[in-house]
């Protein structure tokens, strides 16, 4: 197995752990059912075309909602950034995650599928143990990115990191003014930023 396939397998295993954690801990604030579609063949289409890895079915609305899941390794001695990151530019010139999200959000008739929520998990590179997981509404992530762009003159220098032939834009969890739910090791302490504002509007 080559390095790319190793990384994909690592990501799938750790994404499943993050899914199980969120599924177990969220009943009171995100009622409904969660489904991990990464194990199905159709998941490749959802992932590549719409950035969707999981499906959320709210208990109080006849609807479904997609969730994007990103996993990031943390090697010994490295920093656990606790941020949401999305591909901003690919060296190959192919469509990025951010462009796909904007396309779906800005579609006049909302014809395209997109994740309503965005999850990012930091995992110990050796043990594959979850160190922290954050979850936010995708539209709030996009709004925060736009706000940073409009206010920071040096945002390209401070916000773009080049990894695996792509540039990533990052937003720290604490920078999000809207709903963010966070689990942090060692005791899976739940930290919440801005949750009071959206307790009555959790469903997309």
Image (spheres, helix red, strand yellow):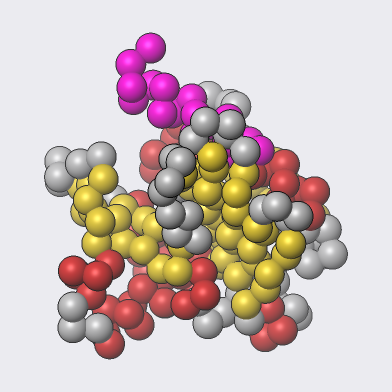
> Residue 193, relative to residue 171: is it above or below?
below
Which of the 4 image quadrants contains residue 73? top left
Q: Can residue 59 be seen in this view?
A: no
Q: Main secondary structure of the magenta part?
A: helix
Figure quadrant of residue 19: top right
Residue drawn where x is 47% and y is 77% of the image: 175
Q: Where is residue 125 in the image (x, y as percent from the top left)?
A: 49, 35
Percent coordinates x, y for residue 68 in the rendering: 52, 50
Q: What stretch is highlighted in magenta?
A: 1-17
Which residue is outermost to the front? 77
Q: Nearer the viewer, residue 119 or 142?
A: 119
Q: Does residue 78 appear to the left or right of 14 in the view shown?
A: left
Q: How many marks?
A: 0
Q: Quadrant of residue 63?
A: bottom right
Q: Which residue is drawn at 60% across and 54% down?
A: 133
Residue drawn at 15 percent across, 41 percent down: 92
- In the rendered structure, the answer to whether residue 195 lies left or right of residue 156 reads right
Residue 32 located within the stretch drawn in magenta: no
Quarter of the C terminus within the rendering: bottom right
Quadrant for the N terminus, please.
top left
Give the percent coordinates (x, y) of residue 55: 64, 47
* Residue beneath the point at 56% across and 67% down: 137
Percent x, y of residue 105:
42, 66
**Does residue 184 appear anywhere in the picture?**
yes
């Amino acid at each position: 197995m080559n390095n790319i396939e190793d990384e994909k397998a690592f990501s799938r295993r750790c994404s499943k752990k993050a899914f199980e954690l969120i599924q177990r801990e969220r009943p009171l604030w995100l009622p409904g059912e969660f489904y991990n579609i990464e194990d199905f063949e159709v998941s490749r289409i959802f992932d590549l075309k719409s950035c969707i890895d999981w499906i959320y079915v709210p208990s109080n609305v006849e609807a479904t909602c997609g969730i994007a899941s990103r996993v990031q390794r943390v090697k010994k001695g490295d920093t656990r950034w606790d941020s949401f990151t999305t591909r901003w530019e690919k060296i190959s010139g192919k469509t990025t995650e951010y462009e796909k999200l904007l396309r779906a959000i800005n579609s006049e008739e909302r014809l395209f599928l997109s994740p309503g929520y965005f999850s990012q998990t930091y995992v110990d590179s050796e043990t594959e143990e979850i160190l922290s997981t954050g979850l936010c509404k995708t539209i709030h992530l996009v709004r925060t990115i736009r706000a940073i762009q409009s206010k920071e003159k040096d945002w390209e220098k401070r916000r773009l990191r080049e990894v695996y032939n792509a540039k990533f834009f990052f937003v720290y969890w604490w920078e999000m003014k809207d709903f963010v739910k966070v689990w942090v090791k060692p005791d899976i302490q739940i930290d919440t930023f801005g949750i009071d504002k959206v307790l009555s509007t959790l469903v997309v």
